[in-house]
Each structure stands twice: as C-alpha cells, then as structure tokens.
Image (cartoon, grey):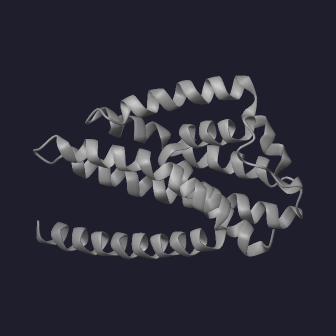
C-alpha cells in the first residue's frame, strides 16, 4: 500500500470513527470474521476485530449508540462523553491496523486518524446540538439515520478507494475550519455588541 493509500485509510477510519466508533469496529469485525474483507499482510493485526469477545462488546456498544443517538438531547450527552472516547478509539484502531510500518510514519498516521476523528466528531456533535434546538422532532432522527447509512458506504470507500476518501476528508476539513472561523468571527461581533 502506498503512503497516499495509507493516508486515505487513516483519514477514512478517523472520519468514520468520529461518527460511529462502535459500529465501525463491529462492521469491520463481521467483515473480517466471515472473510468478506481480505486483509493484506500489512493489516493482519486487524484480525482481532473478528474475535468473538470484540464482536460482542462492539455490538452491544453499537446498539447502545444507535439507540442513544435517536433520543434528542440524550444524543448530545452521549456525544459529550464520546468527545474523548472516539478520537482515542480511532487512534488505537489505526495503531493496531498499521503496526508493520516504519515507526515515524505510524505515529503520523495515528495522529491524523485521531485528529480527523475529533474533527468529524465535533462537526457531528455541533450539528446534532443545533438540531436539538429546532422545534420539530424529525431533523434529529433524519441526521441519525443518515449517519447510520453513511457508515457502510464510507467504509467501502475507505477500503477500496482510499485516495478518493483522502480527497473527500481534506475537503471536509477545509470546509469545517472555514465554517468554524466564520462562527467565531460572528460570535466575537455579537459579544462586542452585547
């Protein structure tokens, strides 16, 4: 796998883990356990995801996340707690996945994975908090279901087209930081006027 492919894999795993860490681990584990995802020698350490204990725990946590994510306001509490868990989980997943590469590249990829996970998690949490303030109850459920449906597509793209995923994640990061700058500027202006 080329460095660009590894960067795309790290970015894709980070992005998906920031949205649905437990479901990502569970789906990867199922694909590995039933031979639907063949791992290159470089990724052989991911075989642990297909073990029964990991599948059981990740399935239970994915169910808990699935349910909590559908409950307005509780989803924001869940996201607050997972601000620490998702990036660390993504970094551990990356560390496990790419264990057989040069150490400095491995550290870089782990940092990218954790950073992208934190950013996608922050975008998700902020969007969901905003949806919780809307008077109608449907937007929260629509966002949650969209995230659920995005995971398999995102994982498929990450595995088969990591360079495309890298480009998409870079576009997301640029948009995210551009929007954050606009929000900060808006808040500064509003606070000065108040």
Task: Judge from the rendering whether residue 185 lies leftward or rightward of residue 160; answer left or right.
Answer: left
Residue sitting at x 66%, y 28%: 55
Residue sitting at x 41%, y 41%: 79
Task: Judge from the rendering whether residue 108 lies leftward or rightward of residue 184; answer left or right.
Answer: right
Residue sitting at x 54%, y 39%: 23
Quadrant of the rendering where the C terminus is positioned: bottom left
Instruction: Measuring from the top left, give residue 47's x and y in whole percent.
Output: 80, 39
**Residue 115, can we see it?**
no
Task: Judge from the rendering whether residue 41 lies leftward or rightward of residue 23; answer left or right.
Answer: right
Instruction: Measuring from the top left, give residue 80's x and y in whole percent.
Output: 41, 41
**Above or below 174: residue 95:** above
**Residue 120, can we see it?**
yes
Q: How many marks?
A: 0
38 vs 107, nearest the viewer: 38
Q: Quadrant of residue 127?
A: bottom left
Instruction: Measuring from the top left, give residue 147's x and y in whole percent.
Output: 41, 49
Instruction: Measuring from the top left, give residue 87's x and y in whole percent.
Output: 58, 49
181 vs 25, nearest the viewer: 25
30 vs 43, nearest the viewer: 30
**Above or below 85: residue 101:** below
Quadrant of the rendering where the N terminus is positioned: bottom right
């Amino acid at each position: 796998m080329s460095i660009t492919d590894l960067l795309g894999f790290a970015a894709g795993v980070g992005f998906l883990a920031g949205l649905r860490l437990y479901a990502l681990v569970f789906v990867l584990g199922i694909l590995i356990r039933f031979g639907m995802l063949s791992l290159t020698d470089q990724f052989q350490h991911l075989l642990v995801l297909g073990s029964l204990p990991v599948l059981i725990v990740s399935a239970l946590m994915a169910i808990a996340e699935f349910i909590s994510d559908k409950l307005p306001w509780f989803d924001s509490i869940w996201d607050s707690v997972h601000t620490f868990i998702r990036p660390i989980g993504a970094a551990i997943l990356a560390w496990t996945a790419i264990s057989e590469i040069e150490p400095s590249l491995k550290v870089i990829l782990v940092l990218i994975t954790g950073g992208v996970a934190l950013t996608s998690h922050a975008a998700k949490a902020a969007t969901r908090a905003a949806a919780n303030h809307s008077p109608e109850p449907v937007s929260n459920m629509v966002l949650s279901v969209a995230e659920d449906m995005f995971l398999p597509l995102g994982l498929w793209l990450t595995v088969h087209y990591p360079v495309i995923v890298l480009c998409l994640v870079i576009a997301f990061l640029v948009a995210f930081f551009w929007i954050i700058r606009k929000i900060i500027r808006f808040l500064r202006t509003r606070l000065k006027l108040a």
